[in-house]
Image (cartoon, helix red, strand yellow):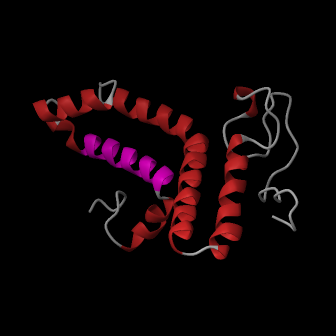
Amino acid sequence: MSGGGLPEPPSGITESQDAHGQGAHNGPPRGRWAPHDIPSAVELLDAVREFLESDVLPATEGRVRFHARVAANVVGMVARELALGPDQAAAHTARLAALGVHSDAELAAAIRSGGLDARADEVRAVVRAAVADKLAVANPGYLRDAGKGDTPESGR
């Protein structure tokens, strides 16, 4: 925040939008969220997270600092889920369908019954992709750091 005024907009935000309400912003296409204008929900959450990290955390200590860090992490997770969730859900549904199941519960049942034993490599790929999607929302830093050890991509 600048001197008690309104928070600075997150970097990369523009006011340009095309005829379909889509533009240079983070998050789902604007058409899905009409009639809401800039900033998007994701942009608002990014601004709150930035405020917590740059203004609140340095000015606090102890329990309040810990809770501010937790709040910043939660706000970041919610923003990432809003931005990534719809595409992740569609991709996950497609991956499950390729295995002939419609839900994680059906996948688990097919694994338990041995019904997918002949497709173990495909099952592993679907499960790894689901874990990677979850980590991209919950803790994207883990995915960035994972190249140094066991990762879903390394097969270890």
Q: Is residue 48 above or below residue 127?
A: below
Q: Residue 126 lies in magenta, yes or no?
A: yes
The residues colored magenta run 121-138
In the rendered structure, the answer to whether residue 67 lies left or right of residue 5 reads: left
Res 48 quadrant in image = bottom right
Picture coordinates of residue 39, whole percent (x, y): 79, 44
At 29% from the left and 59% from the top, the residue drawn is 155
At 72% from the left and 29% from the top, the residue drawn is 33
On-image quarter of the N terminus? bottom right
In the rendered structure, the answer to whether residue 87 lies left or right of residue 24 reads: left
Picture coordinates of residue 60, whole percent (x, y): 62, 73
Q: Is residue 92 above or below residue 150?
A: above
Picture coordinates of residue 20, whole percent (x, y): 80, 28
At 31% from the left and 44% from the top, the residue drawn is 127
Q: Residue 95 lies in magenta, yes or no?
A: no
Q: Main secondary structure of the magenta part?
A: helix
Furthest residue in direction front, as rendered: 63
